Image: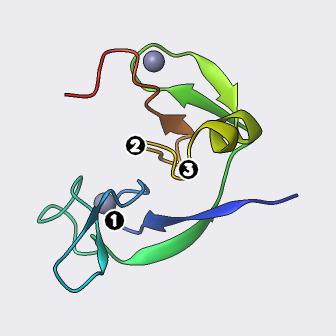
Amino acid sequence: MVTTMTACKGCGGSMMAIDKNGKPVCTTCAGLSPDSSIPIEVEMPDTWKCSQCGKETTTEALLRRWVVIPFANATRGTYYDGCRGWD
Ligand SMILES: [Zn+2]
Ligand SMILES: [Zn+2]
């Protein structure tokens, strides 16, 4: 099974914010990349690594836990599991 997600063309990350028109926006590369906030469909990797602690997990396990994988970057296969808190 191939699972895809919508990512930002500019940085490959998931778009975590929605603007006042209901359009997903990328807060990571806004103003840095001309392709920022252009949605592309990317294939999810089989395994993901937390960008902070390096803990690996599978797409299946992540989707059981979250509807939207936090700080997911499907291009790099990284996400954030909340190990250092959320603020
Ligand atoms: Zn971006
Ligand atoms: Zn972690």
The residue indicated by pointer 1 is 10
> Which residue in the protein does label 2 denote?
71
Looking at the image, which residue is at 47% across and 64% down? 7
Graded by Cα atoms within 10 Å as few (under 14), some (14 to 19) or many (20 or more), the crowding at tag 3 reads many
Secondary structure found at label 1: loop
Q: Position of residue 30 (x, y in %)?
A: 17, 64
Dot 3 corresponds to which residue?
74
Q: CA distance from mark 2 to mark 1?
A: 14 Å
> In front of the other: label 2 or label 1?
2
Q: Which quarter of the picture shows residue 58?
A: top right
Q: CA distance from mark 3 to mark 2?
A: 10 Å
> Within 8 Å of ligand 1, the CB of disc 1?
yes
> Marks 1 and 3, Cα distance to the nearest angstrom?
13 Å
Within 10 Å of disc 2 (Cα), the crowding (few <14, some 14-19, many 20+) is some
Q: Position of residue 84 (x, y in %)?
A: 32, 15
Amino acid, disc 2 = Phe
Say if disc 3 is inside 8 Å of ligand 1: no
Label 2: element kind = loop
